[in-house]
Image (cartoon, rainbow, N blue to C red):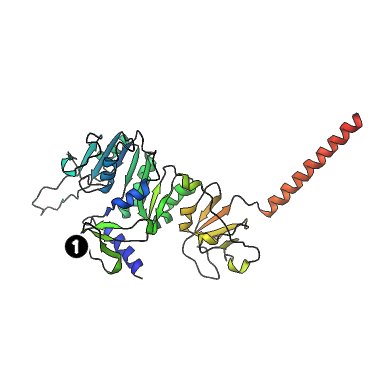
Amino acid sequence: MTRNATNQLLQKAKKSKSDEFYTQLCDIERELQYYPVSFKGKVVYCNCDDPRKSNFFRFFAINFHKFGLKKLIASCYREQNNDIFNQHESEKGFYCEYTGEHGDYFNPAEIELVHFKGDGDFRSAECVELLKQSDVVVTNPPFSLFREFVAQLARYDKQFLVIGNVNAITYKEIFDLIQNDKAWLGVNLGRGISGFIVPDNYEGYGTEVSANETGQTIIATNGCLWLTNLELTQRHEDLDLTKEYHGNEEKYPKYDNCDGINVNKTQDIPKDYSGLIGVPITFLHKYNPSQFEIVRFRKGDDGKDLCVNGKCPYFRILIKNKRIQMPELRKISSVIVSSENASSQDKEQNLCAIS
């Protein structure tokens, strides 16, 4: 109950322009270790980041030469107050560029900021121009704008590594990218992302809010993921299947509106079932496109949510195991093999007769 409430608070706060959430350096280090050559010779753009505070910018600045970056860019949004009663000039958004001139030494106070004419929204023309100059985008975008953010990256054909809510998988735009092998989940998921740095006045409660070693307030969440299109060795590793369907049919109920079985946990996917299998969305964390085919998301043959005995389990992804042939295909293969063997025997007999 506390976990769900905390995730709801996080979502609500992320939508608020007055709240700021920063990714912890330890979480960035934990994920970025799996992409040692992905940034070599590249321009990296952190387009939702105040370079004076962002741990993304800090990480890449410190590791600029280790990762072989060409350039590092960060841009920051500032809300514009267009109220006629506002007596103060709106603060402009800003950005900075870094080319590794300080070596491994990094001091945020020495960063030279360049102010935009506008607010620095990632969708603005000024930020899009910076995006066009970049190769890879790495950041923690606003959760409420996640699908629009990723759609922009796809539109400009950019590589990316971004943090989002696990439920972003259920967005059609995001799921389509995953199904078409144009995006996939990173290495860390759920508890693999330990939490976000939030303002000291953040209204949290319970065990989900704590302080780190420097006294910063941290909100923990079990509902986040890394989404990327950077190549990962891990995504080509086979999921080890140990369960069997045959002889355990009662553990794998059929859907009411689809000729497939329901599986509640990824670890329970049977190794001997050739038909459609409905799995939870977290399966995508273990998804190997060479081992499984993603058939469709959520819906049965009638266009309605998949259901078992009248009840709909939480969003399911229908998959097929590519390594198992359907019974019909096995029969066809057997006939073909038999035919080929018979043909070979006929040829041998003909050759004997000729000789």
Residue that sits furthest to the left in the current view: 87
Judging depth in this view, the residue of 174 and 342 nearest the camera is: 342
Which quadrant is home to the N terminus? bottom left
**Is 22 drawn above or below residue 208 in the view shown?**
above
Relative placement, left or right, of 33 versus 124 is right
Q: Position of residue 52 (x, y in %)?
A: 20, 46
Judging depth in this view, the residue of 207 and 341 nearest the camera is: 207
From this viewpoint, is residue 275 visible? Answer: yes
Q: Residue at 25% x, 66% y: name it.
A: 204
Relative placement, left or right, of 116 versus 343 is left
Disc 1 secondary structure class: loop
Q: Position of residue 120 (x, y in %)?
A: 23, 44
Q: Residue at 24% x, 58% y: name it.
A: 213
Q: Position of residue 276 (x, y in %)?
A: 58, 57
Q: Residue at 62% x, 62% y: name it.
A: 245
Judging depth in this view, the residue of 354 and 233 nearest the camera is: 233
Relative placement, left or right, of 264 versus 1 is right
Residue that sits furthest to the top in the current view: 355
From this viewpoint, is residue 122 visible? Answer: no
Q: Which residue corresponds to mark 1?
A: 201
Which quadrant is home to the C terminus? top right
